[in-house]
Image (cartoon, rainbow, N blue to C red):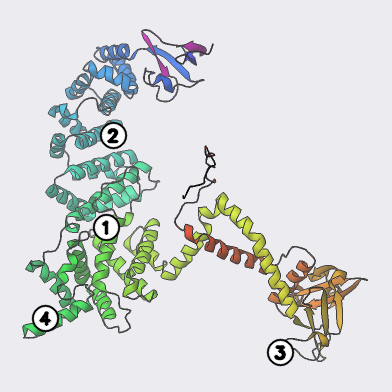
């Protein structure tokens, strides 16, 4: 009879004894815990997850353990209390134990121990660890935390000298308070400032730095709009940015994943301050907003005097707005009514025009003076580029869990977003010219620019100047080269279906190359005779018959300009008589001339046909191409493998082209590793229909 499903064979450890294999069903007054890993309790819900061979440890039940520890942490003996808190910090990660301990008002007991201010060092560290672990289960609300507890924890953070383990846990507790309770955010924000947290970034302990930035991010995320702008201004200060760069990012140690994630979160939250402008439409009737467009026009065209007449002024403005590259020449304000990018695009354009005026004027005038329809429309490009940068940098989006994609260069400038735009708009203008683009190519150019920017960002440039250098190396021609290289090396080309396709195609391609080589032999080639250099140079010609059965050859007085008829070639060798083809030093005419120290180039172009009875026909090809064609062709006649460099190159090129043609319809479609399963046979094969 098979064993009951509830009975599992496990090894059980007793304190002071070796593990023994037992069959267990249920244990009264005691509980089982995993001996390895987190040592969680086995419950009715989790017992089905046990596997044969698992090592368990017999322990008192969670309820008894919680009661005993609660009594011990309230005892008067310091040593007993410390051991109890140490055990509590370990068990608090278990949800079953945490539920029992919390039901006994354990969290209130721990909070009172902290509020008393009588615990220090290890005892306080274990108390805070247990408190944080218990609260993280989400069994009780953070809103129950008292004001005195918050002030005590904030005091540990603000103290100049505090134990590292206590500081770590205090920062983590404050972060959880801010993230889990709106009311607690305001209480924490009254006691903790960004300036105080920045001080913790100058330490050498990366964990302290990580917790400090995590708390900054939490305060940033939960702050109201006006407070968030104030925090952003504080973080943008050169002194604080230098601390983040020099003490966190550029420290003499690798940045751990959690720190990288917190830097990424800080970057995203900073850029999210642009969301309001990004989602604000321009009001065409707002004169202040229209004045910004007028300012763009004035800066670009050197403040030309406006004509006196309204109609003349309107006509001139329309012309200028067209030269500025706006889509709506009559009323360019309409170009900024789509969100995103909304007014953020206009902000970027104005920043470029005022802070990088020479660059702005050059871009506008360079394109507005062209008459070949290759002008790059500045206005339209700036608007679309702003939208693209918002997508790349996740403006207006919440940070992704587990993402570590931060960029150090955004911590090097107080106006990093605007400077980034200025670099990218110059890249766009350069790429437009390299592509010789017209208005119809606008989307293609934007796709290339997106690829240039994302590739450059993936290299993690440390500053905006480094970014410029990376972008200079990613020209349009380089992007095309990279695309081609990546298409050839992409994972799909290494998958079993593609490898199988390549193996099926290869014999066809080899046959095609073989026919080309034989056709070239049928056309024939002229070869130079080796002899005394002081004598007049002589030539001879060799070609294969159309039926591939005979090689015809004969002497010529001079190099032929066209095809040589077979009648002039008096000598011949039946292909069936050919014994072998040798090359290089193995050729008889190279061995005979060894004393003359043959030129290396001649040696590389030499080959010979050996035929019965021990006769040979010696060749020196005029160039490497003819050498490969003839040696390949002769090998093909003899049924041997064509092994020249030319054949390998032709094979790779032709197979690549053929595979691309055959896979053209599958572009951007994932090719499965294995064929789809064969469907089940139908219940009946009566597939006939009665059309009557």
Q: Are marks 3 and 1 in contact (CB under 8 Å)?
A: no
**From the viewer's perspective, is the residue at label 1 or at label 2 nearer?**
1
Compared to 150, does 433 lie above or below? below
Q: Earlier in the sequence, mark 3 or mark 4?
A: 4
Question: Which segment did they paint magenta?
Answer: 20-35
User: Any magenta on residue 74?
Assistant: no
Q: Earlier in the sequence, mark 1 or mark 2?
A: 2
**From the viewer's perspective, is the residue at label 1 or at label 4 nearer?**
4
Q: Which residue is mark 2?
A: 168
Give the CA separation, mark 1 to mark 2: 35 Å
Q: Earlier in the sequence, mark 3 or mark 1?
A: 1
374 and 118: which one is in front?
374
Q: Which mark is residue 561?
A: 3
Task: State the residue at coordinates (60%, 63%).
Answer: 655
The N terminus sits in image quarter: top right
Question: Local crowd at mark 3 within 10 Å, few (<14), some, or many (≥20)?
Answer: few
**From the viewer's perspective, is the residue at label 2 or at label 3 nearer?**
3
270 and 513: which one is in front?
513
Left or right of residue 536: residue 692: left
Give the CA separation, mark 4 to mark 2: 65 Å
Looking at the image, the residue that sits furthest to the front is: 692
Q: Which residue is mark 4?
A: 314
Can residue 18 be seen in the rendering of this structure? no
Task: State the residue at coordinates (63%, 56%).
Answer: 503
Q: Position of residue 634 (x, y in %)?
A: 78, 70
Give the CA separation, mark 3 to mark 1: 65 Å
Label 4 SS: helix
Task: State the residue at coordinates (15%, 34%).
Answer: 184
Q: Position of residue 402 (x, y in %)?
A: 35, 43
Give the CA separation, mark 2 to mark 3: 88 Å
Quarter holding residue 189: top left
Question: Local crowd at mark 1 within 10 Å, few (<14), some, or many (≥20)?
Answer: many
């Amino acid at each position: 009879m098979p064993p009951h499903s509830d009975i599992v064979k496990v090894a059980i450890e007793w304190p002071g004894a070796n593990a023994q294999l037992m069959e267990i069903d249920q244990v009264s007054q005691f509980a089982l815990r995993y001996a390895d890993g987190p040592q969680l309790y086995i419950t009715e819900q989790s017992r089905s997850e046990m596997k044969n061979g698992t090592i368990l440890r017999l322990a008192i039940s969670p309820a008894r353990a919680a009661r005993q520890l609660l009594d011990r942490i309230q005892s008067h003996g310091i040593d007993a209390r410390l051991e109890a808190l140490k055990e509590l910090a370990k068990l608090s990660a278990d949800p079953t134990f945490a539920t029992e301990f919390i039901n006994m008002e354990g969290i209130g007991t721990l909070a009172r121990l902290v509020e008393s201010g009588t615990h220090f060092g290890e005892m306080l560290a274990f108390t805070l660890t247990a408190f944080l672990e218990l609260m993280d289960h989400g069994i009780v609300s953070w809103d129950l935390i008292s004001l005195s507890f918050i002030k005590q924890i904030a005091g540990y953070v603000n103290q100049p000298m505090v134990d590292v383990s206590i500081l770590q846990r205090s920062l983590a507790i404050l972060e959880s308070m801010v993230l889990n309770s709106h009311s607690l955010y305001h209480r924490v924000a009254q006691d903790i400032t960004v300036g105080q947290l920045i001080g913790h970034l100058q330490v050498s302990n990366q964990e302290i730095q990580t917790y400090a930035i995590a708390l900054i991010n939490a305060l940033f995320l939960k702050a109201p709009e006006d407070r968030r702008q104030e925090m952003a201004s504080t973080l943008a200060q050169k002194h604080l940015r230098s601390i983040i760069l020099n003490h966190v990012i550029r420290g003499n140690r690798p940045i751990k994943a959690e720190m990288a994630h917190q830097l990424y979160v800080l970057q995203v939250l900073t850029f999210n301050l642009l969301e309001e402008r990004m989602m604000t439409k321009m009001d065409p009737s707002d004169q202040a907003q229209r004045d910004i467009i007028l300012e763009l026009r004035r800066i670009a065209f050197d403040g030309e005097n406006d004509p006196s007449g309204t109609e003349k002024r309107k006509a001139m403005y329309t012309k200028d707005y067209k030269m500025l590259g706006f889509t709506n020449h009559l009323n360019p304000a309409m170009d900024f009514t789509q969100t995103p990018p909304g007014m953020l695009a206009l902000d970027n354009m104005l920043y470029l025009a005022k802070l990088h005026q020479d660059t702005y004027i050059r871009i506008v005038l360079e394109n507005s003076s062209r008459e070949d329809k290759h002008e790059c429309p500045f206005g339209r490009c700036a608007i679309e580029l702003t939208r693209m940068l918002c997508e790349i940098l996740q403006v207006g989006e919440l940070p992704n869990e587990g993402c570590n994609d931060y960029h150090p260069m955004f911590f090097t400038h107080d106006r990093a977003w605007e400077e980034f735009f200025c670099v990218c708009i110059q890249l766009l203008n350069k790429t437009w010219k390299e592509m010789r683009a017209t208005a119809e190519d606008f989307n293609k150019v934007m796709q290339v620019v997106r690829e240039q920017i994302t590739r450059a960002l993936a290299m993690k440039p440390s500053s905006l100047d480094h970014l410029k250098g990376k972008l200079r190396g990613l020209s349009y021609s380089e992007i095309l080269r990279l695309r081609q290289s990546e298409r050839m090396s992409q994972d799909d080309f290494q998958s079993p279906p593609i490898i199988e396709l390549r193996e099926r195609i290869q014999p066809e391609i080899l046959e095609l190359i073989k026919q080309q080589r034989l056709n070239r032999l049928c056309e024939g080639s002229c070869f130079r005779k080796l002899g005394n250099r002081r004598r007049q140079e002589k030539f001879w010609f060799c070609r294969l018959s159309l039926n591939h059965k005979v090689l015809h050859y004969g002497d010529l007085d001079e190099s032929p300009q066209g095809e040589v008829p077979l009648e002039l070639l008096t000598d011949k060798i039946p292909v069936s008589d050919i014994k072998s083809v040798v090359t290089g030093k193995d050729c008889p005419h190279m061995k005979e001339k060894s004393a003359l120290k043959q030129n290396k180039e001649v040696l590389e172009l030499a080959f010979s046909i050996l035929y019965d009875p021990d006769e040979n026909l010696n060749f020196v090809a005029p160039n490497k191409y003819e050498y490969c064609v003839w040696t390949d062709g002769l090998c093909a006649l003899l049924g041997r493998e064509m092994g020249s460099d030319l054949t390998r190159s032709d094979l790779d090129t032709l197979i690549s082209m053929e595979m691309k043609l055959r896979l053209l319809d599958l572009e951007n479609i994932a090719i499965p590793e294995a064929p789809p399963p064969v469907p089940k046979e139908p219940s009946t094969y009566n597939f006939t229909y009665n059309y009557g």
